[in-house]
Amino acid sequence: MSSIDFSQFLLPDKLRDEFPILSQLVRGQPLVYLDNAATTQKPQVVIDAITSHYREANANVHRGLYYLSERATSAYEEARQVIANYLNCSSNKEIIFTRSATEGINLLANCLTQKLSKGDRILLTEMEHHSNLVPWQLAAQQKQLILDFVPVLPEQGTLDLDAFEKLLSREPKIFSVTHISNGLGTVNPIEKLVSRARSLGITTIVDASQSAGHKPINVQQIACDFLVFSGHKMCGPSGIGILYGRQNLLEQMDPWQGGGEMISKVTLETSTWAEIPHKFEAGTPNIEGAIGLAAAVKFLKKIDLQRISYHDQTLAKLAAQELREIPQVKIFGPLHQQHPPEYAGILSFSIKGMHAHDVVALADRKGIALRAGHHCNQPLMRRLGAASTARASFYLYNTPNEVNKLVQTIHWIIKNYLE
Amino acid sequence: MISQDDELYKEVLLDHARHPRNYGVPSHPNVIVESENPQCGDEITLYLILSEDHSTISSSHFTGQACAICTASASMLTTKIRNITLQAAELTAKQFLSMIKRPPDAPSADLSGPLGSLAALDGVRKFPARVKCAALPWRALQQALQQASTGGGTSSLEIRDE
């Protein structure tokens, strides 16, 4: 074990009691849930916020002139304010509720490319989740745009910043980049990347799916034009996501989807649009989702997002230190190195001579939930020469004891499968 | 051992996964099917060597990178599909696929039945996500048999779900 005392950064084990699902046995063993980069578990306060909305306050929003509708509307709009505060937006009009980060990027890929012309370029990176790749491929096909990719340095798992600089000289119109790699746990120097791109007049988008709810996020400090994330990866319900956009940019953009809620005046021939944020929220929104997400944000802020970030990192580093000692284990990404560049609570690894699916299926025998596969990162995995990896991703309710169980289980798998 | 009480990773299966039989590219195969499940990354290429009149499979071989379930399934396939007619191979593929696609709570397959030791793969039914792993080589075989009856050659196959 390392001589560094990590315990000062760790959150108390009793936080687990807030998450009812964690107390169950899986295949006769206590559940060790380490697939938090895919989705996170929900605390009782979030479950309660959703059920009490349905039990006490359900009505459609922004329509009814009666008590319940007013109550539902104010809960929905308060939720927007809670998210705006978390991101330090200058106005809550900058927060649009979406279905997911994926939907947010699809909205942007549609709306921001409307005015682009054939041959215009969009800059992405090799470490993007498919959700920040495929929507741009679709838009590129439609508008005959060109996609460029900042390469990943395979050893460090970080972006090649020299190549980034060269790709900027091709004058992309849009730069969309993930804050944290879901496959490798790399934390990108987001402020640096964004400020460099914006200084050249490039529209900047940040995919915060792996950072929202795991660390403080300040959109004014990052200074991006847009930022997206999903609620379910940060203790919130699924089916709700956030698109942040600068107010002046959102105002200039045409709507994406049409329907109720997003209109001002409608005739049979034409319509005028509602003000932002409603212009981008066609149809009855996911009201309980927004309320549940706001409850999650309050819960996380009370714990302290900076501490959550330290906690995630500490557990990933502890696991990496132990797994690095096992000759058959190969770690991918920053934690591959003894003194890694900035990393998050995500640890990707493989066991020599074993397919990741077998590693994960055998870990499941011990009640451990890991992810196997390409993590919606097929191009990145190909670049790293790994068809698939096993991934352990940590969150506030994981404990050092669970890290030990993971390490013991990897030893057990190697002994029983390979030897 | 994992296999003592494990419904999926049985000893015979692990043995095939660790020491796959008929692994490698044979010389002059009549039929080649490159099969892949892009969702999970299993890749199996199946090779058939046919008798002169193309009525019988003399031997089958495979290469590729896949999980233990898929590798064992391919390895066991090649031991079973040997010196039998195309029709018999087709029937075996059909029997195998219907065995692993029975409901999870159906009674265990009989090791003394026509599928013999292939019944060891019956346990995948209890792990629905792994049914496609066991099925992939057999899907490749089905395509290979079709090709065999129409003159042989090389083709590819992409499967996501069963």
Image (cartoon, helix red, strand yellow):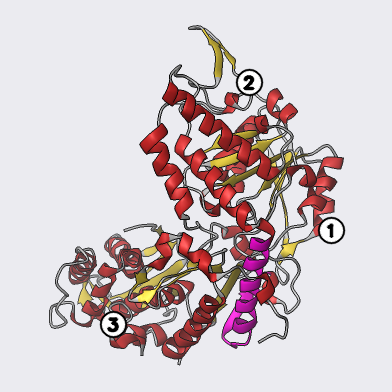
Q: Position of residue A65 (x, y in %)?
A: 46, 16
Residue under disc 3 on the same chain as residue under disc 2: no
Name the residue type under label 1: Asp
Name the chief secondary structure element in magenta: helix
The C terminus of chain A, quarter of image: bottom left
Relative to residue A341, is residue A136 depicted above or below? above
Q: Does the stretch in magenta take in B89?
A: no
Relative to residue A152, is residue A290 depicted above or below? above
Could one spot residue A418 in this view of the protein? yes
Question: Which numbered tag is attached to residue A275?
Answer: 2
Taking A228 as reference, is B132 left or right?
left
Question: Given the image, what chain letter belongs to the residue carrying mark 2?
Answer: A
The CA span between labels 3 and 2 is: 69 Å
Name the quadrant containing residue A262. Answer: top right
Label 2 vs label 1, nearer the camera: 2
At x 51%, y 50%, the residue is A232
Which of B1 and A218 lies nearest the eye of the viewer? A218
Query: Mark 3 Cα within 10 Å, few/some/many (few <14, many 20+)?
Result: some
Q: Regarding mark 1 in the picture, which secondary structure is present there?
A: helix
Q: Regarding mark 3 in the picture, which secondary structure is present there?
A: helix
Q: Quickly name the residue at label 1.
A: A162
